[in-house]
Image (tube, coloured by chain):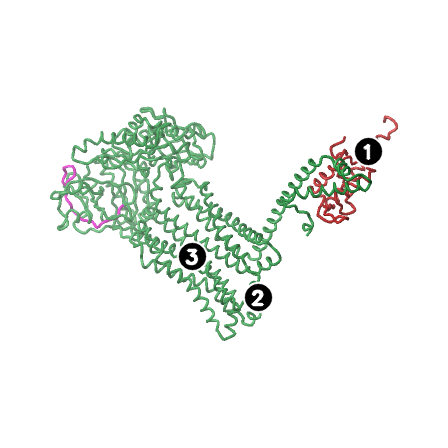
């Protein structure tokens, strides 16, 4: 169930990155911080795989990137959702909800079905 | 515009960028940890720990970014190609006339080239489509594919059946040796179409024919060694794929079917593969018959038993490990030994053996035998040079058109450059346009080539020989065509593109306000390259036109040359009297009766006959003694001769210069008589009359009774040779051979061919009449290659003329358009329309004149190469030069007149306002 991507379920990290960028351009560190904060630091065990995922999503064309200046005036690589990335985010959210809903329903079952 | 914001990594910077990005993360994390109270060193260690395997992540990111960069480069390339193509299509649509001219020009060039090269390939170059053709050895003169000689002297260039068997059994360097000879005319009844006999093309071949060539059967079996053992002649035939398709609708049930050939039932045992057209290029047989069947099918004319009948060509296959020179040397020796052994007798009689003097023709058999090859070699090489010239002109024309267009687009290019288009991008875009045109032109050219190659091959092989030459465009030809179009493409595409892209931005922008003066000064200078191209084209087309004019004039001379015969009123009737087995008195009665019957037909003025015939059949020569004449060379005592019927001179419409014709009174037993031609009379009796003189042949004295003006009996372009004519009924040979009756008519001889056939049928239903043709038709057929060459040369001349005219038209249109302002100004200042027209025309003629100055000496020099093809026309014929120059100037004037008139219609007000 767990894969090398920071100890996350396969595909979950992609979903979280897309979500993190849904409010606008962020650099990688900011994405990591958002995931820590949003998931109560439970999900991202290692931060390195986040970058592999960012570059992979960029190659897929879901993310665009450009160099910009950070809040502390340092040069940083900013990512933002492309048009297809936004579509992907919507698709992955509904996928996740169906999946999570199905699993939740299954484990909440009180009796063996007839 | 979205792309501008995209991060496009340059390959070299990818690793650095990844390092920088990751370092930023580590630093941010470290700072956050320090802020929460850690020491600097511990914080960095903790940041790295939280990050995980830094090197692994870095490498993955770098790989991903490289992949992405590659994808993007590829995508951009396609995107730009799409743009370029769309742009090219748009610009073709905007200017369809220009595109059409370029595509048609290219198509003509590629079409003409490919078809001529296909012809050259099929006739001159292509090897036989059999396994390892390079190991075949041809023995005999490869042009004598349909020859037959009757002479006790054994020839080294064509062989008797005995000689073939001797060579076949004695050679050590060949693994097999096949023989093939003409099938002649055979009556074939397939039963498919009533009772009418057909005359398919047949060839007699030895049983090992297919084995030596390595040709398998397509259906059934081919001939085998056992099929031609002496004494056993199985009545079988192998038919060609073409004949099978045409005659038997490709019915696989054809095997075992019995057809009748002459009077014999013959069984079809096999069909050859479609790619095999026999060993004679240009002669695709329908039937392959075993040699041993020949005496069975033509019992009156057996060709195998008599060693003096020489009619076979031989093709052997070299054994493994035997070098070509060694095989050739061995075979040459065998032939020499054979001829030497059998010609001893003649030599001791004082004659000189042929073989001791003649070289023995042994060569590579890879390309088979062919008479077409020998006949068409020189014309084809000339045509190839013509085609090369046309191709040069086409390149020049297209370069010219694109130059002109590129100049016209200078402004457009300037604007695009100033908007930031890269120079390389501009070049690429122009090349894409050229490429589009080249692809269209090449495609159209190939279509044209397929069609015209077929036409050419039929014209070469003759329309009565379907599929004789392989019409497939061969791979080398396709390669050549592609190479030609690529070279053309580079020539015409790259040069203008580079030139245009060097446009100086400032001058383009300024030109708008100064175009009036610019067109007079700099503009003229820029057209220089166009002018040079036009002059070159004029020179080249003059060469082609002069060549065409010479060949056409030569053909006219040839067609109208004095033959000493009444060429428009003779019908030649080829009768196979040898099949009737007539001897002695029977044979004399036969010719008397046939002559008498034909004479009584309405419209017939005179009838006679001869053994060899005029422009048909064969030629014979004989040696003799002339009392009082001492020969300096052996050939001085030989001349061509024919045996003719009474009234021969009158029948052929010949002119009797002295003495009398042969008459009914010159019968067997009466004193032997002969007619001689003028050349012969002058040769032996230069200072006195030939009448009453004696010729002695085999101890028989023959008296010369008449002198006939020279006639051309077999070849229109032949020099007059010595000929004499003997009385047929006084001949030494008993049995009647084939005969050609000459029927002189009052009107069109073609109208009499049906009545003549009917009359002969009425006389003897069994008598085979092989051919009834007007002499004029036979003469035309005898100069088929001259006609083909003249026709094609005229075609190329016209093509060249058209190209030069199109080029001139294009250049003048362009020049006058550029000078619209100047012309308007001139007219505003009082110039009349006539002045403008004259000005433009004079300019065009100046270009043409420049071309002529170069072209006339060039044409004069190059057309000397045609000398051997010309009949009665000198290579530097002034009339032909005049014709070529006048035609060229006339077309140039027409081509320039259109833009000139358009220029003259310029409204000065409009012209000046557009500036």
State how far apart marks 2 and 1 are (Cα). 74 Å
Subunit under mark 2: B
Chain represented in red? A
The mark nearer the N terminus, 2 or 3, is 2
Q: Tell me residue B530's x, y (percent).
A: 46, 59
State how far apart marks 1 and 3 are (Cα). 83 Å
Q: Residue B464 bears which disc, if any?
A: none
Specify whether B341 is left or right of B671.
right
Q: Tell me residue B209's x, y (percent).
A: 37, 30
Q: Which residue is mark 2?
A: B512
Q: Secondary structure at mark 3?
A: helix
Chain represented in green? B
- Residue closer to the observer: B167 or B182: B167
Subunit under mark 3: B
Give the quarter of the figure containing the C terminus of chain B: bottom right
Is B52 located above or below residue B686 in the figure? above
- Can you name the residue that lies furthest to the left here? B628
Q: Is residue B709 magenta?
A: yes
Q: Are marks 2 and 3 in contact (CB under 8 Å)?
A: no
Q: Which residues are magenta?
A: B696-713
Whether residue B299 is visible, yes or no, is no
State how far apart marks 2 and 3 are (Cα). 33 Å
Subunit under mark 1: A
- Residue closer to the observer: B724 or B515: B515
Q: Which residue is mark 3?
A: B537
Specify whether B170 is left or right of B670.
right
Is B623 located above or below residue B551 in the figure? above
Q: Residue A102 bears which disc, if any?
A: 1
Category of crowding for the residue at label 1, using alpha-carbon neighbours closer than 10 angstroms: few (below 14), some (14–19), many (at least 20): few
Category of crowding for the residue at label 3, using alpha-carbon neighbours closer than 10 angstroms: few (below 14), some (14–19), many (at least 20): many
């Amino acid at each position: 169930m767990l894969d090398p991507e920071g100890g996350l379920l396969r595909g979950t990290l992609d979903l979280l990155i897309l979500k993190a960028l849904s409010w606008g351009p962020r650099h990688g560190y900011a994405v990591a911080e958002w995931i820590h904060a949003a998931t109560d630091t439970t999900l991202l065990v290692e931060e390195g795989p986040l970058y592999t995922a960012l570059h992979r999503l960029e190659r897929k064309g879901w993310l665009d990137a450009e160099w910009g200046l950070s809040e502390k005036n340092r040069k940083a690589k900013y990512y933002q959702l492309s048009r297809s990335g936004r579509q992907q985010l919507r698709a992955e959210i509904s996928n996740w909800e169906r999946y999570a809903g199905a699993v939740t329903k299954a484990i909440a079952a009180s009796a063996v079905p007839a | 515009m979205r792309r501008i914001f995209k991060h496009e990594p340059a390959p070299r910077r990818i690793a650095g960028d990844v390092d920088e990005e990751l370092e930023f993360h580590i630093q941010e994390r470290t700072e956050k940890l320090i802020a929460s109270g850690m020491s600097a060193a511990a914080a960095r260690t903790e940041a790295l720990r939280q990050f995980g395997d830094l090197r692994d992540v870095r490498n993955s990111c770098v790989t991903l970014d490289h992949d992405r960069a590659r994808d993007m480069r590829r995508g951009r390339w396609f995107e730009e190609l799409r743009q370029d193509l769309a742009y090219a299509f748009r610009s073709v649509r905007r200017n369809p006339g220009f595109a059409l001219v370029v595509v048609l020009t290219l198509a003509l060039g590629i079409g003409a080239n490919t078809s001529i090269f296909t012809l050259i390939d099929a006739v001159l170059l292509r090897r036989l489509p059999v396994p390892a053709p390079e190991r075949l050895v041809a023995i005999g003169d490869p042009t004598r594919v349909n020859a037959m000689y009757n002479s006790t002297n054994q020839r080294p260039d064509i062989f008797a059946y005995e000689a073939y068997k001797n060579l076949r059994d004695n050679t050590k360097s060949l693994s097999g040796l096949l023989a093939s000879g003409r099938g002649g005319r055979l009556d074939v009844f397939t039963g498919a179409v009533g009772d009418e006999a057909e005359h398919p093309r047949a060839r007699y071949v030895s049983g090992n024919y297919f084995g030596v060539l390595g040709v398998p059967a397509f259906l059934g079996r081919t001939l085998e060694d056992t099929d031609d053992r002496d004494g056993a002649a199985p009545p079988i035939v192998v038919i060609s794929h073409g004949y099978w398709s045409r005659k038997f609708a490709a019915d696989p049930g054809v095997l075992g079917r019995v057809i009748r050939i002459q009077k014999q039932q013959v069984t079809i045992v096999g069909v050859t593969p479609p790619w095999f057209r026999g060993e004679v290029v240009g002669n695709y047989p329908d039937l392959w018959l075993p040699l041993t069947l020949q005496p069975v099918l033509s019992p009156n004319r057996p060709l195998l038993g008599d060693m003096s009948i020489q009619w076979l060509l031989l093709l052997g296959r070299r054994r493994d490990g035997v070098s070509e020179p060694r095989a050739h040397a061995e075979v040459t020796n065998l032939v020499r030994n054979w001829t030497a052994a059998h010609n001893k007798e003649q030599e001791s009689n004082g004659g000189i053996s042929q073989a001791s003097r003649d070289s023995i023709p042994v060569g590579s058999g890879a390309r088979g035998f062919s008479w077409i090859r020998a006949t068409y070699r020189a014309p084809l090489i000339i045509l190839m040079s013509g085609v090369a010239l046309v191709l040069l002109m086409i390149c020049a024309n297209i370069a010219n058109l694109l130059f002109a267009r590129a100049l016209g687009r200078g402004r457009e290019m300037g604007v695009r450059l100033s908007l930031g288009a890269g120079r390389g991008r501009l070049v690429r875009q122009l090349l894409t346009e050229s490429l589009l045109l080249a692809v269209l032109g090449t495609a159209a050219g190939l279509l044209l080539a397929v069609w015209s190659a077929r036409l050419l091959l039929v014209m070469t092989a003759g329309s009565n020989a379907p599929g004789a030459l392989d019409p497939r465009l061969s791979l080398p030809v396709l390669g050549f065509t592609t190479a030609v179009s690529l070279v053309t493409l580079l020539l015409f595409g790259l040069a203008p593109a580079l030139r245009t892209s060097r446009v100086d931005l400032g001058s383009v922008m300024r030109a708008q306000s100064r175009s009036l003066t610019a067109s007079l000064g700099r503009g003229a200078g820029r057209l220089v390259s166009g002018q040079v191209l036009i002059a070159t084209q004029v020179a080249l087309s003059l060469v082609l036109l002069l060549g065409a004019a010479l060949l056409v004039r030569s053909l006219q001379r040839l067609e109208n040359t004095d033959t000493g015969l009444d060429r428009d009123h003779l019908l030649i009737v080829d009768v196979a009297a040898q099949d009737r087995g007539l001897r002695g008195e029977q044979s004399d009665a036969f010719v008397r009766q046939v002559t008498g019957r034909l004479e009584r037909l309405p419209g017939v003025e005179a009838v006679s006959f001869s053994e060899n015939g005029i422009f048909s059949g064969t030629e014979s020569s004989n040696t003799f003694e002339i009392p009082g004449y001492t020969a300096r060379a052996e050939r001085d005592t030989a001349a061509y001769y024919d045996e003719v019927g009474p009234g021969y001179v009158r029948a052929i419409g010949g002119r009797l210069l002295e003495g009398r014709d042969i008459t009914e009174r010159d019968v067997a037993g009466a004193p032997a008589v002969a007619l001689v031609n003028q050349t012969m009379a002058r040769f032996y009796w230069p200072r006195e009359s030939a009448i009453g003189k004696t010729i002695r042949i085999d101890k028989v004295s023959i008296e010369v009774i008449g002198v006939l003006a020279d006639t051309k009996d077999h070849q229109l372009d032949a020099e007059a040779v010595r000929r004499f004519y003997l009385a047929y009924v006084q001949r030494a040979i008993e049995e009647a051979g084939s005969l050609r009756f000459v029927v002189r008519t009052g009107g069109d001889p073609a109208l009499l061919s049906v009545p003549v056939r009917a009359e002969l049928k009425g006389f003897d239903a069994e008598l085979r009449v092989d051919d009834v043709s007007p002499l004029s038709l036979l003469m035309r057929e005898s100069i088929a290659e001259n006609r083909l060459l003249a026709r094609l040369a005229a075609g190329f001349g016209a093509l060249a003329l058209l190209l030069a005219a199109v080029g001139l038209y294009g250049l003048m249109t362009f020049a006058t358009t550029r000078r619209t302002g100047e012309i308007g100004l001139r007219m505003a200042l009082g110039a009349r329309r006539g002045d403008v027209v004259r000005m433009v025309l004079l300019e065009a003629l100046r270009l043409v004149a420049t071309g002529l100055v170069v072209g006339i000496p060039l044409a004069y020099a190059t057309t000397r190469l045609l000398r051997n093809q010309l009949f009665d026309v000198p290579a530097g014929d002034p009339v032909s030069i005049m014709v070529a120059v006048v035609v060229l100037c006339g077309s140039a004037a027409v081509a320039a007149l259109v833009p000139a008139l358009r220029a003259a219609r310029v409204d000065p007000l409009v012209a000046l306002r557009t500036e």
